[in-house]
Amino acid sequence: MSAKSYDVVGIGNAIVDVLVQADDDQLDAFGLTKGTMALVDEHQAERLYANVGPGLETSGGSAANTLAGIAQLGGRAGFIGRVRDDQLGAIFAHDIRSVGASFETPAACSGPSTARCLILVTPDAQRTMCTYLGASVGLDPADLDLDMVARARVLYLEGYLWDSDEAKRAFIAAAEVARAHGGEVALSLSDAFCVERHRDSFQELVDGHVDILFANEMEITALYKANSFEEAAEQVRGRCRIAALTRSELGSVILNGAGTHLVEPFRLGPLVDTTGAGDLYAAGFLHGHTQGLAVEECGRLGSLCAGQVVTQLGPRPQADLRQLAQTHLGSAV
Amino acid sequence: MSAKSYDVVGIGNAIVDVLVQADDDQLDAFGLTKGTMALVDEHQAERLYANVGPGLETSGGSAANTLAGIAQLGGRAGFIGRVRDDQLGAIFAHDIRSVGASFETPAACSGPSTARCLILVTPDAQRTMCTYLGASVGLDPADLDLDMVARARVLYLEGYLWDSDEAKRAFIAAAEVARAHGGEVALSLSDAFCVERHRDSFQELVDGHVDILFANEMEITALYKANSFEEAAEQVRGRCRIAALTRSELGSVILNGAGTHLVEPFRLGPLVDTTGAGDLYAAGFLHGHTQGLAVEECGRLGSLCAGQVVTQLGPRPQADLRQLAQTHLGSAV
């Protein structure tokens, strides 16, 4: 790997989250499946919003959350994604830059507004998401800062991008550039429904382009239509260099060649909101990876970051992640 | 008092808050006085925002927080204030309506954007505010729904409105309509610097128009240039029917004619952020008042609501205030 000026560069949907409290009856009334992400159009988004309680707004977006977390951990992070030149777009840009990540994708001057994700948080701390992709759909190869991608040790991609044809092309172009410049490619499968929509593409991608794969139990079993987590894990083993598979309260399982590492979860307080748990696991893991830690140490740092974010509302850690890592993991990071 | 369709109608600045974590060094660097509210222009607001960490956005505005709280308690609440027809304006309107308050002031179609308040929350849970008044300044008598005001048992006004000449005129016009229709007028002094700016006007207002006054210790001593809280309390006694004076961890003191009632604070958990404490005290107090409770019971409900909101980030209670009142105060409410 040549000298790189970024540890991790991520490509994803640039989204502002609207977090609202909800109950199971509301999920049923809206026809939503708990714990998943549903795509909605602008009209549906407005209708849902009109029928929920007061919101808390915070920057979100799966890969963006991961890159913000890496920056908070002290890593050199860059994010590529598209907002509109509107108030929510300005909030998104401010928040990711303010933690030290680079974000230079030009805001769209016309077209749909900045993407919003209505996140219904139920009393069991589960989050159910309805995403209006807005301006983020328009990310195309012309928006890609391929120089930034070439300078990354790891290129991180979120599976959600697969829902847009332009973004998907941008995504593969970027993966090829990263590889050509000696970088690694990491992918998060994002959501089980997203995997259902794009199973074949994801399988090809994992086999052909991905060094490090992140998936939760539902996503990895959906990817291989497996009957159990164990079966899915054996399917993915060896198809990419590292597979980090998260299992909520069971912790995570990291497959690394023939090796299998079990990582315990961290419990840092009462469970408030699981939004961002997977994103922050990836942040800790990838930061550890670029700092040269062994995979089990990467997993522990991922678990720690995920363990923090679920104790608060919203996917961007309000705690000092570096201090937390120092306290719980010592000088390893 | 004739039959009324609103318990409380409030007039205030319609603001979206941007909550950020900060430390004392940042307050010093920005030249801010901890615990106060400073007015900033759009340029200053942008410059400050560019120099702070990531934010959490939530609807705010002092009187708006109070009216939202009254609606959450089950009161019939209405709010009058001005937003722009932009994304933050839509968030403000959604949030206050979603808790059941009426909000029908038309959004401005041109001119400055919706008001924003950058709130720096320090590790001691104190909040220091920088407000860009934007579209809210343009509230003028033409925006006032005087029919709504006439139908209110209590008209609630925030002192912050005094910083705009148009709003000040709207404010006095509304107080006269409320009185003429048998309603009461309540005022919050809002902020010690605000009192310094408008001392004479506020003194006249209290003497001539106000039935119920809310002030904290700094505000009431500023109003009468008093040397102590006790001296200020004796100055205000009898100038309005009820004065509810809040003293943070010392609780509150309610002056009611010759009577003096001391109310203990509620401690419901670790102190996180004092944003909205005074607003929610007023919410509980006024809700109790319109439900016919004795002043000390009104004070206890105010203390309870304030005690809840300081355990969370932001000024709009995320807890169920009705349930909380039931648990802590029983069937009184």
Image (cartoon, coloured by chain):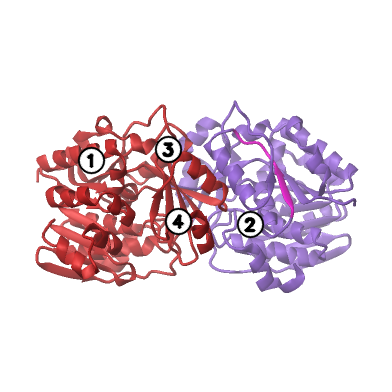
Chain colours: A red, B purple
Which chain does the numbered disc 4 sit on? A
The residue to which callout 4 is attached is A32
For label 4, count other residues whose C-alpha is less than 10 Å away and answer few (under 14), some (14-19) or many (20+): some
The question of residue A11 being in magenta is answered with no
Local secondary structure at mark 1: helix
What residue did someone put label 2 on?
B277
Quick check: B40 left or right of B294?
left
Report crowding for label 1: few under 14, some 14 to 19, many 20 or more residues within 10 A (C-alpha). Answer: many
| Any part of residue B187 in sight | yes
Nearer the observer: mark 2 or 1; the answer is 1
- Do marks 2 and 3 share a subunit? no
Q: CA distance from mark 2 to mark 3?
A: 33 Å
Residue A104: name its quadrant: top left
The span shown in magenta is B76-84
Residue A171's disc number = 1
- Three-letter residue code for mark 4: Leu
Discs 2, 4: same chain: no
Q: Are marks 4 and 3 in contact (CB under 8 Å)?
A: no
The answer to whether the residue labelled 3 contacts the one labelled 1, judged by CB atoms less than 8 Å apart, is no
Question: Can you tell which of label 1 and label 4 is closer to the viewer?
Answer: 4
Chain of the residue on which disc 2 is drawn: B
